[in-house]
Amino acid sequence: TVTIQTFNFPANKTFDVLMDRIGTRAINGISAGAVNTNDGGSFVVTFEVPPALKGLNQIAIRLESNDGSGFFAYNWFYNRTTP
């Protein structure tokens, strides 16, 4: 799993969560679920790493609004549980 903390998110929006190899910015990545921002602002949420990415050392993660607004957030993380 990966746990992230967000900042400055708009309220009451649904974001698709995508993950992929480092360097891709997770654009058109593998779906890892979705999250609703409720009150917006800052929140902490945990996602499962997709099975196809579990052996990678670094993984890109992207939260992308599914309402067509173009709002997204991107980062990457070290997958410290890789063999």
Image: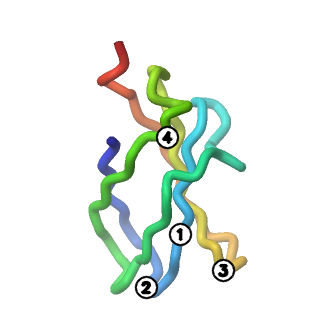
Mark 3 neighbour class, 10 Å CA radius: few under 14, some 14 to 19, many 20 or more: few
Q: Quadrant of the C terminus?
A: top left
Quick check: 66 left or right of 47?
right
Amino acid carrying mark 4 in the image: Pro
Q: What element carries label 3?
A: loop
Evaluate if marks 3 and 2 touch, with contact meaning CB atoms under 8 Å apart. Answer: no
User: Mark 4 — residue?
Assistant: 50
Point out the frontmost of discs 1 and 4: 4
User: Mark 3 — residue?
Assistant: 67
Among numbered discs 4 and 3, the one appearing first in the sequence: 4
- From mark 4 to mark 3, how far is it between C-alphas? 24 Å
Q: Is mark 4 on a helix, strand or loop?
A: loop
Residue at x 49%, y 65% (from the top left corner):
34
Location of residue 51 in the rendering, given as x and y in whole percent from the top left corner:
49, 34
- From mark 3 to mark 2, how far is it between C-alphas? 13 Å
Mark 1 neighbour class, 10 Å CA radius: few under 14, some 14 to 19, many 20 or more: many
Quick check: 52 left or right of 79?
right
Point out the frontmost of discs 4 and 3: 4
Is residue 54 or residue 66 the one in the foreground? 54
Is residue 33 or residue 21 the one in the foreground? 33
**What numbered label is drawn on residue 11?**
2
User: Mark 1 — residue?
Assistant: 15
